[in-house]
Image (cartoon, rainbow, N blue to C red):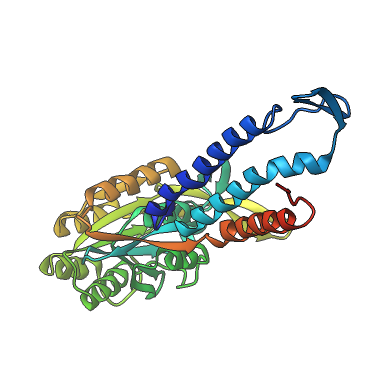
């Protein structure tokens, strides 16, 4: 963004150009040739009362005639500098409670299944999820977002924060199996609910994404859903992939090879969690449907964000002041020495 901090100084630009106009008219009346002469060969034609004569063309004469224009340009640049040109960058200072959103992400071994595509390349379920969740995070404004990951165990990866870049960075570095090979959905819900108690907000939401069946942890998903309903915390559930056999890339005697393994998905549990807490249950069988789900959630979970916009400006006057001074001082110096005009 560009602006002049003191735009009223721009009115002064009229004065040097008005002076140049008056000076040009006077010079035209004094000499028969124009203010800016056009050379014809190597001579200039001069008319006088005694007749017409030719004088040798001189660059010094040309420079002398250009000095008024150069002086005006220098003054104009200095006046523009007085107007304080500035370049700035918009920033937003959020002043709202917003929504608290905890993203609970499954890192169990089944997330290695290669049944998703991104940019026409086959990728694991986790890789497909990372890109979609990252886009979702960057579209939010004013909300606190936290990240909980789970497998056999559940833990907080990123507490509630508005630092979306940090969340996206941590998300990109998540590894399958970092929390164990199994799936503790109840514990993931419990940790998410605990994080939402830390900071008050107008609304608290959990987005739970998994591709398996709860088979680990100390807290059952039924008990966790009951607690969420009591606390009026909405949980949106997303089931990734499909039931049955899915392709996995494993190391064998002859290098890496694809094998098909059985993957269990408890659709009913995810549906029950969403209904009991007032959320919505979604099925994501490919990257496009997964992206559509997060867009839908993004549109559903909106809050009015009160923001105060401000701009961080950078002064640019030196870029005009220095060349303006150089031009003006050059005119003064040459006008007093090499290009001195005698009356």
Q: Please report the residue visible at 28 percent of the width from the left and 55 percent of the height from the top.
A: 237
- Number of labels in the image equals 0
On the picture, is 322 further left or further right than 82? right
Quadrant hosting residue 147:
bottom left
Confirm whether residue 84 shows in the render: no
Residue 278 x, y percent position in the rendering: 15, 55
* Residue found at the far front of this picture: 50
Residue 284 in the image: state x and y as whole percent: 37, 46
Residue for point 34% across, 63% down: 103
**Could you tell me residue 1's position as x and y percent?**
44, 51
Extreme-top residue of the structure? 51
Closest to the observer: 254 or 274?
A: 274
Q: Is residue 66 above or below residue 179?
A: above
| Image location (x, y in percent) of residue 313 | 44, 62
Q: Residue, x 86% and y 31% (percent of image)? A: 55
In the image, residue 295 sits, relative to residue 190, either above or below, namely: above
Residue 230 visible here: yes
Q: Looking at the rendering, which quadrant does residue 323 occupy?
A: bottom right
Query: 37 or 83: nearer the eye?
Result: 37
Q: Is residue 108 shown left or right of residue 339?
A: left
At x 71%, y 28%, the residue is 33
Question: Considering depth in this image, is 93 or 190 the residue closer to the camera?
Answer: 93
């Amino acid at each position: 963004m560009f602006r002049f901090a003191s735009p009223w100084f721009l009115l002064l630009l009229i004065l040097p150009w008005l002076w140049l106009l008056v000076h040009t008219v006077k010079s035209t009346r004094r000499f028969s040739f124009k203010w800016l002469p056009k050379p014809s060969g190597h001579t200039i034609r001069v008319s006088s009362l005694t007749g017409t004569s030719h004088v040798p063309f001189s660059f010094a004469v040309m420079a002398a005639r250009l000095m008024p224009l150069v002086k005006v340009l220098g003054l104009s640049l200095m006046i523009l500098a007085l107007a304080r040109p500035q370049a700035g960058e918009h920033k937003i200072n959020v002043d709202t409670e917003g929504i608290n959103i905890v993203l609970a992400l499954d890192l169990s071994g089944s997330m290695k299944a290669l049944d998703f595509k991104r940019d026409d390349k086959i990728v694991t379920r986790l890789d497909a999820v990372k890109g979609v969740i990252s886009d979702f995070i960057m579209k939010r404004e004013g909300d606190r977002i936290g990240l909980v990951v789970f497998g056999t165990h559940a833990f907080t990866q990123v507490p509630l924060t508005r630092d979306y870049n940090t969340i996206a960075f941590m998300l990109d570095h998540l590894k399958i199996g970092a929390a164990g090979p199994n799936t503790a959905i109840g514990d993931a819900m419990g940790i998410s609910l605990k994080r939402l108690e830390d900071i008050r907000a107008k609304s608290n939401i959990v987005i739970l994404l998994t591709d398996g069946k709860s088979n680990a942890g100390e807290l059952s998903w039924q008990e966790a859903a009951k607690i969420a309903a009591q606390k009026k915390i909405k949980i949106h559930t997303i089931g990734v992939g499909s039931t049955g056999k899915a392709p996995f890339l494993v190391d064998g005697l002859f290098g890496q090879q694809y094998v098909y393994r059985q993957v269990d998905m408890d659709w009913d549990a995810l549906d029950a969690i969403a209904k009991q807490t007032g959320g919505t249950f979604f099925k994501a069988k490919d990257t496009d449907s997964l992206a559509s789900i997060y867009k839908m959630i993004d549109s559903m979970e909106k809050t009015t964000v009160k923001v105060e916009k401000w701009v961080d400006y950078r002064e640019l006057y030196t870029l005009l002041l220095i060349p303006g001074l150089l031009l003006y001082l050059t005119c003064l110096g040459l006008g007093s020495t090499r290009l001195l005009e005698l009356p």
